[in-house]
Image (cartoon, helix red, strand yellow):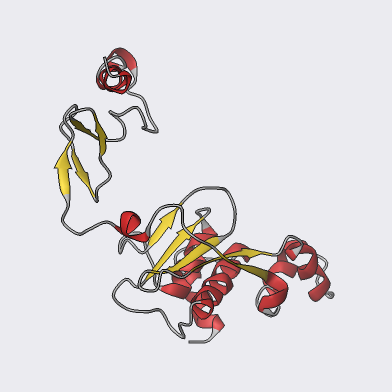
Amino acid sequence: MNLQTYLDKSASNHSHLCPRQILGVRLGLLGLKSLGFSEPPAKKRLLIILETDGCFADGVSAATDCSVGHRTLRVEDYGKTAAVFIDTVTKQAVRIAPTLNIREKACQCAVNEPRHYFAQMQAYQNMPDREMFTITPVALNTPVEDIVSRPGTRVNCDVCGEEILNEREVKQINLTLCRSCAGLGYYQVAGHHEFGFIQKASYVCAGE
């Protein structure tokens, strides 16, 4: 497929095309190329960790066929239009990010388009990869095996009783806990329940 086909695929989820989608498609294609793939590999060999969500993420997904549903696309939200591409077989990993002055370069490339948004729309489809992106070999702080986990693994939290998939449980003393009950959650129970499970988890953390 040519670039326009990938852009159409991305835009179909939005009913429009925007610069960040184009950036995502271009970055996704470069990520494949950087790991030696001429097309998206089969059998979940490619894992991508995005550093933001939104239109950029849809562009990367359109170019690589990686998705949250297939557990081949993850988001660590740093608010950056960057991504790490990982070959789960060879463990090779590269981080690809836009050059720091990519918007200025886009305006210089599209000299006949004074509107910045449309200059980016035009330039991001034509600029060479070397002018758009940086490629940095990286080593993951968490092993690929731990990120991907094993299929079919599940346990129940000893505090709330809810099921935990993909080895995401936390061991504290003699208990198996979900992240929320271990005090590592992203939410708190509101209202008169706020001293329920969370307080129990804090008790466990303190080792009392």
Q: Is residue 107 left or right of residue 155?
A: right
Image vertical order of residue 161 relative to residue 152, above or below: above
- Which residue corresponds to the image point at 18% horizontal and 29% vertical from the top-left? 174
- Which residue corresponds to the image point at 24% horizontal and 48% vertical from the top-left? 167
- The percent position of residue 30, horizontal first and vertical second, equals 56, 76
Q: Is residue 110 visible?
A: no
Q: Is residue 98 visible?
A: yes
State the residue in front, 108 or 17: 108
- The percent position of residue 86, horizontal first and vertical second, equals 44, 67
State the residue in front, 89 or 52: 89
Quarter of the image where the C terminus is located: top left
- Which image quadrant for residue 151? bottom left
- The percent position of residue 16, horizontal first and vertical second, equals 54, 66
- Which image quadrant for residue 110? bottom right
- Which image quadrant for residue 175? top left
Number of numbered markers: 0
- The percent position of residue 192, horizontal first and vertical second, equals 29, 12
